[in-house]
Image: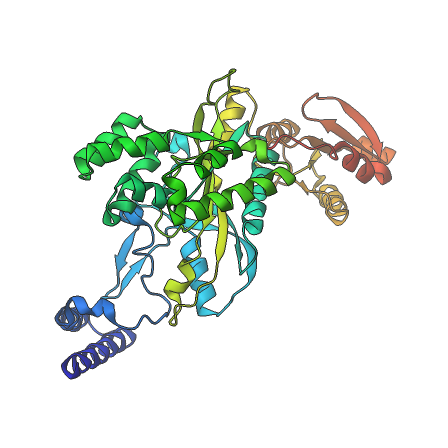
């Protein structure tokens, strides 16, 4: 122990020396030489280095060990001092770390920010290496399933308001999965890797999943077959009640707890009016290691299901679940803070909206601007600036082209391309008459409006909800 403590002190001192040289802007050769010494010292610490007391500081690589097989998609970096760093994979792990660092035990929040995945991009499916996520989380000790039900209600409200088509939210529970694996004979060491295989059932057939579990992951064929009997089931609260009577599953403590919570969850979802959007799906596994309880995933449906047929999914747009142990992984004393949350894939939504509008031969609206202030003749920039200022002061989203004397045709074309619904046109005659010509871009109809009535008229015309784009 004394030798290790001495070596750790040498590593600390050498690290300080490297940082000092960087601050002094020493030569690259000198810095590289000292960095090499630092790395050599760190190597001597050996594998026991990971057993040191975990101290949070910014920045540090805290992402590994949280995502299971998906960890291969983390962008790993290493600075010149040899410190391990990573680009954030999602917003959940940084949120848990924030709770632990600030000793917070109760918070409700939303967060929109970029995350990074070292994945194969698929632009047409909204799959990128750098993209935005929108997360909503509830942290704190509360009675079972009430925060979980609220998260699912929020997810359904978001997807409904976006008007991107019919959707279905699949739900399951990690405890049910673990209990199912246990009674089927899956070794404890293979729970997470088999879980990752099961999670592919929304993309590939059961036979392909079985072949992966048996051929690549060494699971016995008869064990895989038993898993298949369970994971191909889906339904509503009636399936929960059926599994509560299952002679083997009901004897597993974890599975019984998960099924009990799901039954309670369905009661709350019925009261919240969204039970018809929820499906209990035993194939839903969510590959991330930090989930501990209820998990869910929203998929868009290609078309309404025919009688007796399962709706065809066209991709996941939102997901989430309960992660009660994650905060404790960052707390020096292991104090746990129960958490549940959801994540919306922003680019995925954008991609779907764009495809839908293209299919309808509609233009994608690229601005929230309600009206463009335009001029019919030259030398009217001052009048345009006065009018746009009046509209801004009245709370109307207005803009003008940044040209002194733009052509009227160019201004009208800009509105059509950007999806701006109205044009307020100023001309010499309009100035004399004390009116503004208000043009509807869609119908191309024009009407003279008294200047003092313009704000009210624009608000009246834009009060109807526009196309969600």
- Tell me where residue 421 appears, x and y as whole percent: 68, 30
Q: Residue at x 57, y 55 (%)?
A: 143
Q: In the rendered view, tell whether residue 421 sits above or below residue 104.
A: above
Q: Nearer the viewer, residue 204 or 191?
A: 191
- Tell me where residue 390 appears, x and y as whole percent: 77, 46
Q: Residue at x 44, y 27 (%)?
A: 314
Which quadrant does the N terminus fall into? bottom left
Write down the quadrant of residue 160 in the picture: top right
Q: Is residue 294 in view from this perspective?
A: no
Write down the quadrant of residue 123 in the picture: top left
- Quick check: 133 left or right of 74? right
Q: Nearer the viewer, residue 270 or 406?
A: 270
Q: Is residue 137 in view from this perspective?
A: yes
Q: Residue at x 44, y 57 (%)?
A: 324
- Quick check: 457 left or right of 209? right
- Tell me where residue 21 appears, x and y as whole percent: 24, 76
Give the total number of marks visible in the rendering: 0
Q: In the rendered view, tell whether residue 105 sits above or below residue 424.
A: below
Q: Nearer the viewer, residue 416 or 192?
A: 192
- Tell me where residue 426 appears, x and y as whole percent: 75, 34
Q: Residue at x 43, y 68 (%)?
A: 335
Write down the quadrant of residue 122 in the picture: top left
Q: Nearer the viewer, residue 280 or 89?
A: 280
Which quadrant does the C terminus fall into? top right
Residue lying at the far front of the rendered structure: 247
- Quick check: 376 left or right of 417? right
The colour scheme used here is: rainbow
């Amino acid at each position: 122990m004394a030798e290790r403590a001495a070596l750790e002190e040498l590593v600390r001192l050498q690290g300080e020396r490297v940082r000092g040289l960087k601050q002094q802007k020493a030569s690259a050769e000198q810095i590289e030489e000292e960095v090499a010494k630092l790395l050599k010292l760190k190597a001597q610490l050996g594998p026991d280095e990971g057993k040191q007391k975990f101290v949070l500081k910014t920045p540090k690589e805290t992402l590994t060990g949280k995502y299971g097989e998906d960890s291969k998609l983390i962008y790993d970096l290493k600075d010149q001092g040899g410190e391990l760093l990573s680009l954030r994979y999602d917003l959940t792990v940084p949120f848990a770390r924030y709770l632990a660092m600030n000793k917070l035990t109760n918070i409700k929040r939303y967060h929109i920010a970029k995350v990074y995945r070292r994945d194969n991009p698929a632009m047409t499916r909204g799959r990128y290496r750098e993209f935005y996520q929108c997360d909503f989380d509830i942290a704190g000790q509360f009675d079972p399933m009430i925060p979980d039900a609220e998260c699912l209600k929020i997810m359904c409200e978001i997807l409904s308001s976006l008007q991107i088509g019919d959707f279905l939210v699949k739900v399951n529970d990690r405890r049910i999965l673990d209990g199912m694996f246990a009674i089927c004979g899956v070794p404890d060491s293979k729970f997470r890797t088999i879980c990752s295989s099961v999670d592919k059932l929304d993309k590939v057939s059961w036979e392909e999943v079985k072949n992966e579990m048996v051929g690549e992951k060494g699971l016995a064929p008869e064990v895989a077959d038993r898993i298949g009997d369970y994971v191909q089931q889906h339904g509503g609260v009636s399936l929960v009640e059926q599994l509560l009577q299952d002679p083997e599953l009901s004897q597993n403590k974890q599975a019984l707890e998960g099924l009990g919570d799901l039954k309670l969850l369905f009661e709350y979802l019925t009261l919240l009016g969204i039970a018809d959007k929820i499906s209990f799906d035993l194939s839903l596994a969510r590959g991330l290691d930090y989930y501990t309880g209820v998990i869910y995933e929203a998929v868009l449906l290609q078309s309404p299901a025919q009688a007796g047929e399962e709706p065809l999914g066209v991709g996941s747009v939102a997901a989430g679940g309960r992660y009660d142990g994650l905060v404790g992984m960052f707390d020096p004393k292991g104090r746990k803070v129960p958490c549940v949350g959801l994540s919306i894939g922003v680019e995925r939504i954008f991609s779907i909206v764009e495809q839908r509008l293209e299919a309808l031969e509609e233009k994608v609206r690229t601005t929230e601007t309600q009206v463009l202030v335009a001029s019919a003749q030259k030398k009217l920039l001052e009048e345009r600036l006065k009018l746009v200022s009046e509209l801004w002061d009245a709370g109307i989203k207005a803009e003008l082209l940044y040209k002194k004397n733009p052509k009227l045709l160019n201004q009208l074309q800009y509105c059509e391309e950007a999806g701006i619904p109205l044009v307020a046109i100023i001309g010499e005659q309009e100035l004399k008459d004390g009116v503004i010509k208000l043009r509807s871009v869609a119908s191309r109809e024009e009407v003279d409006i008294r200047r003092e009535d313009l704000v009210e008229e624009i608000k009246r015309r834009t009060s109807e909800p526009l196309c969600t784009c």
